[in-house]
Image (cartoon, coloured by chain):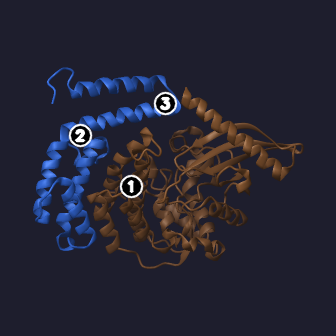
Chain colours: A blue, B brown
């Protein structure tokens, strides 16, 4: 990762400010597109903050739940296939809890304000 | 600028063909005036225009299908037009169907219907002071509309029996989800819950399939017309109840389950007092959870349009990440935290 300035976070803030300023001066689809662009950069910003930690934690939980190994995407695939096939029915509370935690992680990145009070960390 | 010119050229071409299509049906004197674009949307293109004849002027709507996808969840424009004719005949509040496009019109597939004046933007409907009366009436009016719709003999729309959502709506959603080859633990847990808690079979009725805040035209006095019949099929009446109460369609007014407008009791009472079948609240809850799966898959469809390059769009890119919030609604409803 480059040590030069501006760093990734600063670049994101800079472009996000530009998009917000375009949105403030625009109407209709141009305004909406600019707001969507700013929103997506916020998602990138939060994923940079939380993504790695969430991946590690989910990976550990899935390895334990599935008795399996592999990349996180492999583990997701195994989990989803086993849930659908009913192979995790006997561990339903644990399977549900993992899925729920994974969803809360995703919403924390996409739009943390959407979470109910009980799941907010801010 | 190039994009604007391209859009104008497309619009000019459509209007020229539309005028010829109208002249074939209403005589050489027919003209098109006052064209405006309602949507150049993800799945359809909608233009408003005046049909001008020597006898007078009438505001109409041209609706053309633009979504070309092998996994389209929408019924054909031909079937939509047939449905409009049936429900219009039964007095359901819909725009009058005028004519269906034919190959010689060279306007793709679609139809022309009457224009109904009013507002469809959900946030305007939920917040603007002039819609206060309409807001108060929405839940009960929707109950009345559902009662009338669900009373239509499904044999009048027998062609809908072949729609996959009529055969097994859950299997239909799972098949669409699988087509995108994405793995969402939240959705799969939700699917397993839905499979293990399927409601008992109910009488099969004609359901709208996409009745929600955003697909209904309101005037300050109340509901004027029900739009967007492309998800119509045959199924449980409770499916329509679950969809209109989906959290996503409350647009932030989460304490008003019926589209963000009103309470469930007024809605249910209006339905049963107008001849609708008994309400099954547990089944409605099942359909709300099902509705989250369906809405998540529709968002994946929009994101796929962006990622595949077929319909590049920033809002569609956002749809892909929005699925997480829909999954959250789904699991929170299963846990009993959301109602």
In the picture provided, is B177 more to the left or to the right than B89? Answer: left
Q: Is mark 3 on a helix, strand or loop?
A: helix
How far from the left and from the top, in percent, is residue A13?
Answer: 28, 26
- Nearer the observer, A78 or A24: A78
Which badge, 2 or 3, is on the more N-terminal residue? 3
Q: In this view, does A89 lie above or below B260?
A: below
Compared to residue B168, the image places residue B17 above or below, namely: above
Q: In this view, does A47 lie above or below B337?
A: above
* Image coords of residue B244 (percent x, y): 49, 58
- Identify residue for label 3: A30
Residues flagged by tags 3 and 1 on a common chain: no
Say whether marks 1 and 2 touch (CB < 8 Å). Answer: no
Q: At x 74% / y 54%, what residue is drawn?
A: B104
**Quadrant position of the N terminus of chain B in the picture:** top right
Residue assigned mark 1 = B296
Horizontal and vertical percent for residue B176?
41, 62
Image check: B107 left or right of A81?
right
Task: Kindly identify the residue that appears in the image at 61 percent across and 54 percent down.
Answer: B227
Front position in the image: B43 or B215: B43
Q: Percent x, y for residue B41? A: 55, 45
Image disc number at residue A47? 2
Query: Can residue B50 be seen in the rendering of this structure?
Result: yes
Q: Nearer the viewer, residue B264 or B116?
A: B116
C-alpha gap between disc 2 and disc 3: 26 Å
Q: Camera-side residue: B3 or B326? A: B3
Q: How crowded is mark 2: few (under 14 residues within 10 Å), some or many (20 or more)?
A: some
């Amino acid at each position: 990762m480059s040590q030069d300035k501006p760093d990734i976070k600063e670049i994101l803030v800079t472009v996000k400010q530009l998009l917000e300023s375009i949105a403030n001066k625009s109407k209709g689809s141009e305004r909406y597109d600019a707001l969507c662009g700013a929103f997506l950069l916020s998602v990138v910003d939060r994923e940079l903050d939380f993504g790695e930690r969430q991946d590690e934690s989910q990976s550990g939980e899935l390895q334990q739940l599935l008795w399996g190994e592999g990349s996180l995407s492999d583990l997701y695939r195994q989990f989803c296939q086993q849930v659908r096939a009913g192979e995790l029915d006997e561990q339903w509370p644990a399977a549900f809890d993992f899925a729920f935690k994974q969803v809360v992680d995703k919403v924390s990145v996409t739009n943390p304000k959407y979470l109910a009070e009980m799941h907010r960390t801010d | 600028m190039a994009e604007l010119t391209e859009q104008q050229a497309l619009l000019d071409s459509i209007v020229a063909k539309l005028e010829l299509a109208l002249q074939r049906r209403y005589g050489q004197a027919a003209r098109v005036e006052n064209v405006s674009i309602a949507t150049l949307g993800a799945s359809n293109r909608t233009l408003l225009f005046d049909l001008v004849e020597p006898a007078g002027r009438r505001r109409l709507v041209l609706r053309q299908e633009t979504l070309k996808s092998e996994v389209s969840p929408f019924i054909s424009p031909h079937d939509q037009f047939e449905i409009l004719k049936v429900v219009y005949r039964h007095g359901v509040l819909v725009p009058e169907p005028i004519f269906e496009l034919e190959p010689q019109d060279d306007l793709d597939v679609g139809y022309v219907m009457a224009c109904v004046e009013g507002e469809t933007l959900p946030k305007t409907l939920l917040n603007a002071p002039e819609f206060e009366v309409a807001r108060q009436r929405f839940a009960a009016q929707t109950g009345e509309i559902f009662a009338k719709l669900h009373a239509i003999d499904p044999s009048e729309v027998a062609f809908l029996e072949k729609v996959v959502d009529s055969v097994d709506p859950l299997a239909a959603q799972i098949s669409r989800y699988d087509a995108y080859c994405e793995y969402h633990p939240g959705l799969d847990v939700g699917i397993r819950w839905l499979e293990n808690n399927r409601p008992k079979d109910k009488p099969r009725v004609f359901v709208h399939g996409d009745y929600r805040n955003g697909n209904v035209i309101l005037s300050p006095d109340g509901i004027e017309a029900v739009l967007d019949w492309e998800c119509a099929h045959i199924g449980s009446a409770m499916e329509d109840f679950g969809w209109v109460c989906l959290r996503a369609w409350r647009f932030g007014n989460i304490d008003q389950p019926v589209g963000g407008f009103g309470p469930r009791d007024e809605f249910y009472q209006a339905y049963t007092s107008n001849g609708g079948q008994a309400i099954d609240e547990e089944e409605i809850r099942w359909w709300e959870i099902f509705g989250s799966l369906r809405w998540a898959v529709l968002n994946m469809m929009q994101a796929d349009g962006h990622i595949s390059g077929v319909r590049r769009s920033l809002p569609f890119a956002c749809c892909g990440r929005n699925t997480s919030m829909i999954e959250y609604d789904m699991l929170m409803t299963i846990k009993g935290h959301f109602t």
